[in-house]
Structures are given as structure tokens and as C-alpha cells.
Image: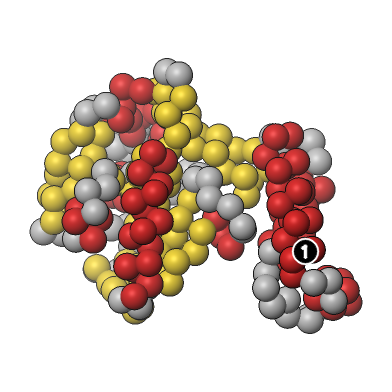
Amino acid sequence: NLLNKAKITYWLDYGSLLAAVRDKKLFDWEHDLDFGMFYNDLEKILVLLRDFEKIGYKVRIEKDFPFIDGLIQIYLPQKFSRQNACIDHIDFYLYKKYQDGFWLRQLQWPRLKFIKFNTNLLIIIKILSEKIVPKKSWKRKLIANIPFSIRNVISRAILKLLVHTMVCRYNYIPLKFFQEFKEIKFYGKYFKVPKDTGRYLSMIYGENWQIPNPNWSWK
């Protein structure tokens, strides 16, 4: 209701879309809901996040990293269940339009060479950007002694370097899939989905997406 009131375009995506179209219900092991959004709506989304927090939802941006790129998570005040599924949060994926498609960049997932090095840098950025650093180890104790204003400058400098140099996970979606949407009914509510749903799911999960595959991995 909040999303509709704010006039933010959103649609069922990834596992939630697959569950709604193929199984007509949430997967038994499911713990979250997946929605796609346009990065161009970021300004409206940021305003809306405050509304979520006012009614008891916890907002988590990029898994607690100090930037907004492709992921916002909304944790529910209390879990809700449907059949065997128990949902505790909602994932909002932000797609950026570029040339002939939409891109979803996931900086939290480094790729290729220097994966461990880049992952450690991301962790350092996260610690540096915390106003209060828990002194759980000698490294954190050392960082905690640095004034926050200085830590913030250092974390932003490292982040800027990573954004321009790090090879990470990207999801590319051809322009045609997000140009038109249709609505489907799921648990008594109507949700937008890409109009060419079958081909969209084929692109993400393969041609046999209509057949459950217990060995499939999102990685």
C-alpha cells in the first residue's frame, strides 16, 4: 500500500515471481520476497523508507554498507507465514537503465581475481563507516580510536576506488522485459510482473524453469 501511494513502480522478481507463476504459492523454504524497482525512483524510495521505519520496519541498505547501489531490504516487525514459508524480510532490487537494457550491480559479490582482497576491503569500509564500532577484536579496537569524521573520509575514498575498479556480479536484463507489465493475482493481491513472463523466467532460470530443480543455485 505504501509503494502504491508513493507511485513507485515495482514488480515481483526472481524467486517470488517464479513461485507465483509456477507454483501459485511461496516455496516452503522461502524467507523473503523479491521485488524489482527502477533506480530512477530512488528519491521517492528514500522518502518511503522513513515511512517504513515509522511503522516498525527495519531498513537495511546494501547489507549495511555505506552506499545505495542495487539492494534495499525491509525487515518485518514480525514474521508472517503462508503454508510452510516464513517471511521475515523483503528484498528490493534497483535496476539502472543503460543503453539497451537494465543493470543490477551487486558490489557485495566480488568476482574474478582478488576476490578475498576486495571482500576484506568491503568489510573494512563497513567497519569504518560505523559511528560506534564494537570492540570485538584488536583490529576493531584500533579502528574505534580513529575519530568518526576521519574514518568516514577514509571509507568513502576506499569505496570510490572499489566502485571504479572492482569486478563484481552484474545482472543484465534486456530493455524489452521492463517496458511492459501485466498483473497477476497472488495471495489475494494483484502484483505487476514482466509482460513476457515466460521468456523472462527462461532467461533467469533456464528453459526448464517450469520444472522444479532441487540442484539449482542462484550463485
> What residue sits 85% from the left and 76% below the top?
145
**Residue 50 at x, y = what percent?**
37, 67
Instruction: Identify the image quadrant of the C terminus.
Output: top right
Does residue 129 appear anywhere in the picture?
A: yes
Asked which secondary structure carries label 1, the reply is helix
Closer-to-camera residue (66/31): 66
> What residue sits 36% from the left and 23% below the top?
175
- Which picture quadrant has residue 113? top right
Q: Is 106 displayed left or right of 35 in the figure? A: right
Closer-to-camera residue (2/217): 2
**As displayed, is residue 87 above or below residue 42?**
below
Instruction: Identify the image quadrant of the N terminus.
Output: bottom left
Q: Is 80 displayed left or right of 114 in the figure? A: left
**Residue 132 at x, y = what percent?**
69, 77
Closer-to-camera residue (12/68): 68
- Judging by the rendered image, the residue that carries numbered circle 1 is 151
* Three-letter residue code for mark 1: Arg
**As displayed, is residue 36 above or below residue 81?**
above
> What residue sits 41% from the left and 34% below the top?
204
Does residue 128 appear anywhere in the picture?
A: no
**Residue 166 at x, y = what percent?**
72, 37
- Which picture quadrant has residue 149? bottom right
